Image (cartoon, rainbow, N blue to C red):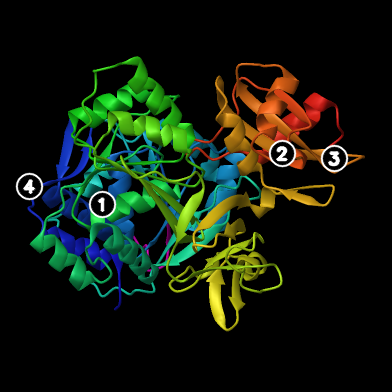
Amino acid sequence: MGYSLGDVLDGVATAVDPAAPALIHNDRTVTWGEFDKRSNNLAREILARGIETGDKNAVYMRNCPEYCEAISAAFKSRTVHLNVNFRYTPEELIYIFDNSDATVVFFSTEFAPQMEELRPKLSKVKLYIEVTPEGAAPSLEGALSHEELATSGDGAPLGIERSGDDLFFLYTGGTTGMPKAVMWPHETFRQIGAAQALVLEKDYSTVESTLAEIRKDPSVTRLMPVCPLMHGTGLFTSLGSMFSGGAVVTMDAGKGFDAEALWDTVVKNRVNAMAIVGDAFAKPMLKALRENPGRYNLDHMASVTSSGVMWSRDVKLGLLEFMPNAMLVDSFGASEAVGFGMSVMANGLETQTAKFAIGDNCKVFAEDGREVVPGSGEPGFIARGGNIPLGYFKDKEKSDATFKTVNGERYAIPGDWCTVEEDGTITLLGRGSVCINSAGEKIYPEEVEEVIKSIDGIRDALVVGVPDEKWGNAVVAVIEGDEMDFEEMRGIIKKHLAGYKVPKQILYKESLGRAPNGKADYKAITSYALETLGIAN
């Protein structure tokens, strides 16, 4: 028993109008009645083919309705959903499938060639379920059709007893090491429900209270995860919409991010909530609005939520010019925990970049375990207590390093540094794993990056440290944008930051190669800087 996400979805289907939209993609709408039946059928078919409770269920596709159906089928069948990055190389894919012990793989026809290549090496996988173009048969020999499974049966609930201890996995991005699967018990989703209650003044913290809220006030949310569903921000925000009886809106994604197509979809489908990952998405979105004055009426937009990277104040202000009624929510979280902090900006309500109201059950600890004193200026690690994941799958050493017991309480401490201001708010400095130690001073790349990105003509920037005889590590900025005089740029940066934080070298690159979720690949950028500067790695 307990807070099972499969039970929540069963209940929501009884609480909403079965004709209400649950999933929208281009011109296709899947109603709640259809979504419930299709995911029930998928879950039943999985179990009928020998898949058991706790078996791992990988989802390898871009954003589409079938992605949400696969997630729902995993929750309902008591199998463990896990996300697969569709940009991974064959070597990385083999690692994910092997490390996770995946027995089921949902994949789209787009990735059938990769699955054909990998299949001889995936001895643990028992079921391949292919999402095909309409009317097409699976292209991978032996694969089952997602559509045929989803439409086989009467769509009735499974009628099985589930547990709040059932798991789902969220693999980390792997930008600073090999990806790790964070083990989230369904029960921990209560804390996300509690966070929603604070914002929406509703109680989604139990199955019963969730259903009561939906019956009393049916959700009108149409949430569009602009970032991939395989990223934590896209996944958690979409689950929030699903568990409140709203709709998840997706669109075809080509090789690059098309901001104009995004806004066309928002207007066409009356999207009123969006999930993005910082300026990597927000800047091109704002650019498209400014280049097409009067084309998009966004008065219906209620919220845009970002998490994962910093979202700069000036970009938020620009978006509010076009979305006058929206709240822009900057959520401070990680794959290992959510709810570290929140920052909300709206017309008439401005906040500073990287400044957050600290979340419930959160504290900031110095390296020696002391709680940081507000206003002291001392940096420390943000820590989240309460309902948190169990740890990393198959990695006790890293689990013990991230999920620690401090003063008798267990916390998730993923490594984000911040300071605590006198008023109790926190200012995010950056992830400790990419912190640069230069002449004994700690420099957090994101702090420097935000200053550089505020300069006209700069589209994006990443900051890394490279070996240096004088400094130990020298700060190097790698910039995507218009080149400008070196000393002029350093002079601008010095107006905002202490001298030791100012880059000693500035390099330019056509593209910084961010992942589809907006995350930076610091390993690749460091290698680029070392090669460009002729420094041995």
Viewed as shown, does residue 42 lie left or right of 12? right
Identify residue type, mark 1: Ser
Examine the rendered structure and indicate whether residue 130 appears above or below residue 39. Answer: above
CB-based contact (under 8 Å), mark 2 and mark 3: no
- The front one of 107 and 534 is 534
Q: Nearer the viewer, mark 2 or mark 1?
A: 2
Magenta segment boundaries in residue numbering: 47-57
Give the class, few, some or many, for how many residues have Cα within 10 Å of label 4's Cα (few <14, many ≥20).
few
Q: Earlier in the sequence, mark 3 or mark 1?
A: 1
Q: Secondary structure at mark 2?
A: strand
Residue 19: give its label: 4
Examine the rendered structure and indicate whether residue 309 appears above or below residue 413. Answer: above
Would you name the residue on which mark 3 appears? 467
How far, Cα to Cα, is label 2 from label 1? Answer: 37 Å
| Residue 126 appears anywhere in the view | no
Q: Earlier in the sequence, mark 2 or mark 1?
A: 1
Give the class, few, some or many, for how many residues have Cα within 10 Å of label 1's Cα (few <14, many ≥20).
many
